[in-house]
């Protein structure tokens, strides 16, 4: 089977899997507990990774429960499924995601919070909602870079959403993401950056598989008097250290 035929087969299976997931969420989630929902989401997400040709590698012990704010670098359209495969979290996502065919409906069904990034007042609203969710014991995940990169380096971490953890006195834990090819070398295949369309990124990923999705787990920490910009700086440094292999979990 050629790479293009294999990619087409993966795409068809992934679309069917997305439709199946939406059906399950709309027909079953109403009678499930929060823990049961996250268990379904984790299994479904890991199945999606396998379908598109991504093998998950977790380095370190991931958190199991909140209250916790999770921060991670952002590379690809598949990042949310990767993190859902590892931690039972809700995401803060850009409002545009709601308009994506099928994926937007799935994102809403799993409890994502949406923010209009260009509106400061909306960011304040989301921070308030996040803080309430953290106080209630939720695990919330954010991508503080605010957009995607190719994955070799980091963009500056924005501090606004970190205020939720400070206000709720909740710990923050960093995760670092990287994609590699079958030989273990860094791969930009799953990246979704610049003017590239979602379809182009998805197709390149499917054609490039098999790939590995690596998640390195950092340490949980409280702000301990740090204001949000200082906290953002320290978290960015920790994620970079994990990617560089010098963080504690990266050695696992």
Image (spheres, helix red, strand yellow):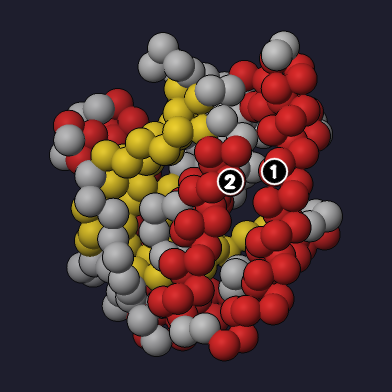
Q: Is residue 251 above or below residue 228?
A: above
Q: Position of residue 34 (x, y in %)?
A: 46, 80
Q: Is residue 172 left or right of residue 44?
A: left
Point 61% across, 30% down: residue? 191
Residue drawn where x is 44% and y is 67% of the image: 39
Q: Quadrant of residue 75?
A: top right
Residue 198 in sight from this viewpoint: no
75 relative to 73 in the view: left or right: right
Q: Are marks 2 and 1 in contact (CB under 8 Å)?
A: yes
Residue at coordinates 47% horizontally, 42% vertically from top-left? Answer: 73
- Mark on residue 118? none
The residue positioned 27% from the left and 34% from the top of the image is 241
Q: Is there any visible trace of residue 33 in the rendered image?
A: yes
Q: Position of residue 50 (x, y in %)?
A: 53, 38
Q: What whole-number distance in Å separates the C-alpha atoms at marks 2 and 1?
A: 7 Å
Crowding near the residue tagged with mark 1, few <14, some 14–19, many ≥20 C-alpha atoms within 10 Å: some
Q: Nearer the viewer, residue 140 or 123?
A: 140
Q: Quadrant of the N terminus?
A: top right
Front residue of 215 and 228: 215
Q: Is residue 175 above or below residue 113?
A: above
Which structural element holds mark 1? Answer: helix
Q: Which residue is mark 2?
A: 48
Q: Which mark is residue 14?
A: 1
- Percent of width and height locating residue 87: 39, 59
Figure quadrant of the C terminus = top left
């Amino acid at each position: 089977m050629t790479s293009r035929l294999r990619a087409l087969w993966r795409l068809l299976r992934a679309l069917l899997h997305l439709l199946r997931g939406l059906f399950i969420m709309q027909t079953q989630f109403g009678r499930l507990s929060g823990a049961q929902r996250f268990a379904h989401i984790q299994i479904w997400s890991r199945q999606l990774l396998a379908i598109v040709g991504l093998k998950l590698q977790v380095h370190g012990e991931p958190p199991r429960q909140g209250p916790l704010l999770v921060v991670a670098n952002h590379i690809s359209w598949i990042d949310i499924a990767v993190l859902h495969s590892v931690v039972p979290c809700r995401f803060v996502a850009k409002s545009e995601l709601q308009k994506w065919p099928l994926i937007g409906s799935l994102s809403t069904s799993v409890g994502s919070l949406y923010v209009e990034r260009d509106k400061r007042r909306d960011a304040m609203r989301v921070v308030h909602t996040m803080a309430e969710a953290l106080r209630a014991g939720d695990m919330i995940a954010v991508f503080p870079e605010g957009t995607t990169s190719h994955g070799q380096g980091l963009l500056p971490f924005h501090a606004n959403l970190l205020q939720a953890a400070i206000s709720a006195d909740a710990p923050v834990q960093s995760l670092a993401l990287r994609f590699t090819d079958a030989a273990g070398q860094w791969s930009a295949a799953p990246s979704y950056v610049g003017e590239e369309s979602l379809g182009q990124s998805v197709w390149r990923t499917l054609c490039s598989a098999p790939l590995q999705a690596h998640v390195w787990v950092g340490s949980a920490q409280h702000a301990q008097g740090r204001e949000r910009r200082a906290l953002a700086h320290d978290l960015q440094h920790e994620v970079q250290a994990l990617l560089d292999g010098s963080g504690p979990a990266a050695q696992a």
